[in-house]
Image: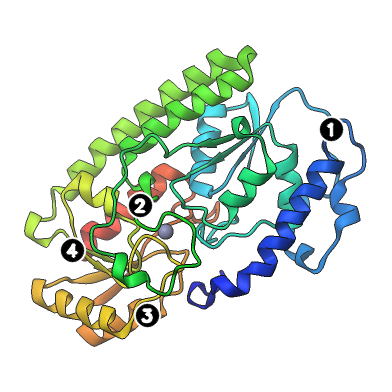
Amino acid sequence: MTEHPFSLRPRGLRPWLLWLAGLFILVAACAAPATSTTPPAASMASPAASTASPATSTAPAVSARLQVLATTTILGDVVKNVAGEAADVRTLLPVNADPHGFQPTPADVVLISQADLVFVNGLGLEELLLPLLAGALPAHKIVAVSEGIEPIVAHAAEDAHEEAAEHDHAEGIDPHTWTDPTHVILWTQVIAAALAAADPAQAERYQANARAYEQTLRDLDAWVQEQVAQVPPAQRLLVSEHAVFAYFARRYGFTQVGTVIPGFSALAEPSAQDLAALEDAIRQVGVRAIFVGNTVNPRLAERVAADTGIRVIPVYSGSLSAADGPASTYVAYIRYNTHAFVAGMN
Ligand SMILES: [Zn+2]
């Protein structure tokens, strides 16, 4: 399963970051000519390579198709819908990986150095990866699909972070924009424009794919509105493990009562007072369930649910499901979560 997010400490990550930054520079230096025939990964084997994907074991054939990377499985699915058959799209993060804590493997570093475009969510979601990307690639190759979206900004979460001074990401900005499907329509437009600019010969295909997918997303948004209408507004009370669903809540009229982990990053930790306050709020307003995503450890949410006598309901948060699971596309992800919310609140 995924790494236990509550055990990630910024101090422990430092050597990793330095090591990876050095690796980026090395790979950028030796992979600079696109005609290089030796796979750089072979000469850079390290203990961390044990989780490397097998996809990089052979040098890629020289391809006329645009080589595109996306960070999360959610973003990767959207990019694939826009790219269609016109570009090669790969996703960096494995299924169920926590985007906040993701660190690239040496094989990922090679993929990144060879990519024509790398799509990231941005707004600080990929906390550990974004600084490395910015140091390794020219700015025009990195496309942050959420940067143009009006973000939700934390109101009073600042006091929860006195110990987090080492973090340099924007903790006050909610990066989980995709939980509102109308935001993914904006993603689609950003992605189509970036693909078309990098690959003008296929521009019309990208734009046509984007228009078709936008219609799918508009239909999805209308479907969610129909579904949530089954929940009386007074019962639309959302408690999740961290603040993943604030954009969904804003779009569809839910009240976010609280979160088990304070703030917008799954790497933060709640204090005993935070948990006590959440349990008080759950009892006071009559919350019926805590929704816990697939990219975090459920232990704390289970404790809060047990203390307050309510249910834990699994949803998908920062990642799609595996290909044979119930949320293997972005559309299926929104449908699955919507069904879970409606069932859990009624
Ligand atoms: Zn998150």
Q: Nearer the viewer, mark 3 or mark 2?
A: 2
**Pair 1/2: label in front:** 2
**Residue at image coords 77%, 48%:** 25
Mark closer to the observer (4, 2)? 2
Label placed on residue 240: none
Asked if labels 2 and 1 touch by Cβ distance under 8 angstroms, the answer is no
Cα separation, mark 1 vs mark 2, equals 41 Å
Q: Are marks 4 and 3 in contact (CB under 8 Å)?
A: no
Eye-nearest disc, 3 or 1: 3
**Left/right of residue 103 with respect to residue 336 in the rendered view:** right
Mark-to-mark CA distance, 4 and 1: 52 Å
Look at 23% across and 52% down and name the residue there.
Answer: 249
Quadrant including the C terminus = bottom left
Which residue is under mark 3? 300
3D distance between C-alphas at marks 4 and 2: 27 Å
Amino acid on which the number 4 mark rests in the picture: Met
- Which of the numbered marks, if any, corresponds to residue 173? 2
Location of residue 169 with respect to 68 vertically, above or below:
below
SS at circle 3: helix
Q: Earlier in the sequence, mark 3 or mark 1?
A: 1
What mark, if any, has residue 61 been given in the picture? 1
For marks 4 and 2 on the same chain, the one whose residue lies earlier in the sequence:
2
**Discs 3, 1 touching: Cβ within 8 Å:** no
- Specify few, some or many for label 4: CA neighbours under 10 Å numbering under 14, 14-19, or 20 or more: some
Residue 345's tag is: 4
